[in-house]
């Protein structure tokens, strides 16, 4: 009887994931599930939804701690699929997909991590929308779904999305992104870390400009003069 219950739970999970896949395919292409090649052609770079990923990680860590009483270890079901959970669904091949479902079966008895994964995918859908109207519809659906969930981390994600709704939709209006700014900020911090701090701001600024390629020399510096022969020695 217990084995039958497990099988029905796995079948239900498969149904949730497959229905999600069919819904995404219908929204994206108006076609059948599995048309991932067309998606890859239109969206070459992966869309990163940090808010959804953070929510998913929080739920996974909490469930892990509640079930096993310790942080993730290499043989724990949820810890083994932590990276697969963050991969976009359409990028998962058949074998990793089965691994993810197996890890959820043994490590997520209350389907809390599965709910966080679905919420994360809903956030990704917003950024994959082709026009502001479609993005607004998907975002409102994501906010409503998160608000009715029983998991606190997912409800918190819904409140975050609602608070930043205008800013999220502005991406589809302008196409602007703070990615270049964040990249330069990361580069500046890396230079400071490698130098173990700088007491002189001018030296710090010059080092950042050198590392970022922001210095253009008026003329190429001359190479240092090298002796053609060794100095004479009476020894």
Image (cartoon, grey):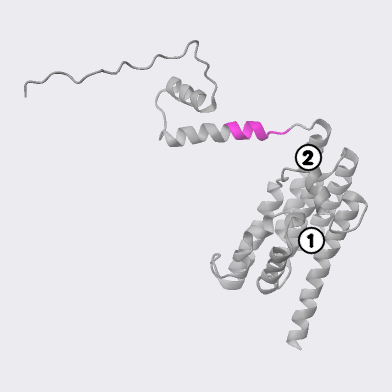
**Residue at point 85% right, 43% down?**
135
Q: Is mark 2 on a helix, strand or loop?
A: helix
Q: Residue 215 carries which label?
A: none
**Left or right: where does residue 93 sit relative to residue 145?**
left
Q: Where is residue 222 in the image (x, y as percent from the top left)?
A: 40, 14
User: Where is the N terminus found, in terms of image quarters?
Assistant: bottom right
Q: Residue furthest front?
A: 229
Q: Is residue 155 visible from the viewing direction of this image?
A: no
* Foreground residue among 195 and 226: 226
- Where residue 129 sits, quadrant-wise, is top right
Q: What stretch is highlighted in magenta?
A: 177-184
Is 211 situated above or below 47?
above
Q: Position of residue 91 (x, y in %)?
A: 74, 55
The mark closer to the camera, 1 or 2, is: 2
**Left or right: where does residue 193 sit relative to residue 29?**
left
- Which residue is labeled 2 in the image? 168
- Where residue 24 sits, quadrant-wise, is bottom right
Q: Where is residue 154 in the image (x, y as percent from the top left)?
A: 74, 57
Is 233 situated above or below 160?
above
- Predominant secondary structure, magenta span: helix
Mark-to-mark CA distance, 1 and 2: 22 Å
Asked if the magenta segment contains residue 182, the reply would be: yes
Is 23 situated above or below 102?
above
Comes first in the chain, label 1 or label 2: 1
Q: Do the residues labelled 1 and 2 touch (CB within 8 Å)?
A: no
**Residue at point 80% right, 74% down?**
11
Asked if the magenta segment contains residue 229, the reply would be: no
Q: Is residue 107 visible from the viewing direction of this image?
A: yes
Q: Position of residue 172 (x, y in %)?
A: 82, 36
- Which residue is labeled 1 in the image? 149
Is 20 situated above or below 188?
below
* Foreground residue among 107 and 165: 107
């Amino acid at each position: 009887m217990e084995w039958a219950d497990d099988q029905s739970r796995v079948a239900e999970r498969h149904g949730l994931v497959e229905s999600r896949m069919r819904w995404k395919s219908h929204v994206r292409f108006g076609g059948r599930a599995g048309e991932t090649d067309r998606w890859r052609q239109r969206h070459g770079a992966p869309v990163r939804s940090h808010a959804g990923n953070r929510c998913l990680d929080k739920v996974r860590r909490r469930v892990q701690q509640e079930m096993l009483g310790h942080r993730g270890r290499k043989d724990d079901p949820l810890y083994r699929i932590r990276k697969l959970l963050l991969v976009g669904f359409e990028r998962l091949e058949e074998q990793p997909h089965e691994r993810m479902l197996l890890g959820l079966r043994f490590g997520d008895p209350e389907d809390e991590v599965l709910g966080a994964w679905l919420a994360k995918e809903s956030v990704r859908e917003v950024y994959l929308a082709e026009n502001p109207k479609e993005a607004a519809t998907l975002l409102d659906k994501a906010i409503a779904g998160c608000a009715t969930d029983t998991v606190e981390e997912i409800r918190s994600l819904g409140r975050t999305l609602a608070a930043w709704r205008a800013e999220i939709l502005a991406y589809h209006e302008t196409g602007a992104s703070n990615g270049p700014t964040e990249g330069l900020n990361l580069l500046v911090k890396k230079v400071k870390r490698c130098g173990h701090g700088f007491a002189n701001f001018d030296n710090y600024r010059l080092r950042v400009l050198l590392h970022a390629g922001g210095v253009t020399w008026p003329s190429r510096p001359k190479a240092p003069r090298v002796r053609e022969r060794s100095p004479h020695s009476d020894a």
